[in-house]
Image (cartoon, helix red, strand yellow):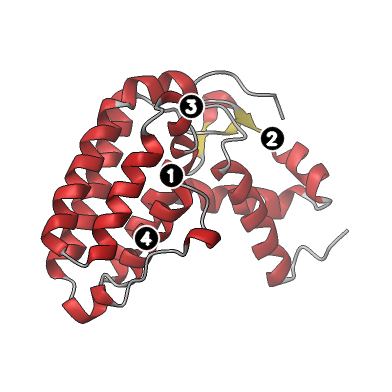
Amino acid sequence: MPDKGNPNTRIRIYESIKAEVRSGAYSPGQPISPAMLAKHLSVSAIPIREALQRLVGERLVEMRQDHNGFLAPLVSEAGLRDLYQAQLVMLLWILEHGTLARLQSVKPPRAQDAAPGLAAIEALFAELADRAGSREMQWSLHNAIDRLHPVCLMKQEVADDWISACERLLEQWQRGDLTAFKDALLDYHRRRVELVPALVERINLPRTMH
């Protein structure tokens, strides 16, 4: 069994659990068993619980006493709209307050390096977060990207035009016109808000139990 006191081991455990949660492996509200994760990762339950507690702080996992432990966050239409709006506000703030030189240093992901749509948009938003000039804004936007990732994975399943919407947004960034990009970002935001009911219905479908 790996040395649970080794900082590298703790980081590996945290990153492994985070990746699984981000992948949408758990349905909203589904219990996350420390014992099962400990068995899967061949470690004791102590570093598993520490990692889950850290993810609770990041709001990627919830902890409820009445559920006897940890569970995947519930997803509601109101909550998803609110998170989308918060992400939009942060992106617009960065575009408004970031220096032109800093923003121009953001390069869109190369086509061969990014899966269509989701990966490219996430990479662009992450790059903008890193150029925010504010550590709080940077952390908050990266956190929003993580929390939205399981939902984003469903977009192609509920909207045939989603890849086209992503491509239009990326095209405006590549052109280097910030005003046009802001307009495209608002259009992108309106489209994803339209998809909220379908996305919430889809993500709440049961998955294979862990």
* Foreground label between 4 and 2: 4
Q: Taking 197 as reference, is 188 above or below it? A: below
Name the residue that disc number 4 marks.
124
* Foreground label between 2 and 3: 3
Write the residue at 14% across / 56% down: 180
Q: Which amino acid type corresponds to the residue marked 3 in the rendered image?
A: Glu
Measured as percent of width and height from the top left, residue 150 is found at 49, 38
The answer to whether the residues at label 2 and label 3 have Cβ atoms under 8 Å apart is no
The answer to whether the residues at label 4 and label 3 have Cβ atoms under 8 Å apart is no
Name the residue that disc number 1 marks.
147
Q: Nearer the viewer, residue 95 or 148?
A: 95
Helix, strand or loop for disc 1:
helix
How far apart in space, not on screen, are marks 4 and 2 (Cα)? Answer: 34 Å
Q: Which amino acid type corresponds to the residue marked 1 in the rendered image?
A: Arg
Helix, strand or loop for disc 3:
helix
Measured as percent of width and height from the top left, residue 108 is found at 38, 65
Q: Nearer the viewer, residue 81 or 186?
A: 186
Visible residue check, residue 59: no
Q: Taking 32 as reference, is 199 above or below it? A: above
Name the residue that disc number 2 marks.
33
Q: Earlier in the sequence, mark 1 or mark 2?
A: 2
On residue 157, the disc is 3
The answer to whether the residues at label 1 and label 4 have Cβ atoms under 8 Å apart is no
Write the residue at 19% across / 56% down: 181
Q: Quadrant of the C terminus?
A: top right
How far apart in space, not on screen, are marks 2 and 3 (Cα)? Answer: 28 Å
Measured as percent of width and height from the top left, residue 84 is found at 28, 40
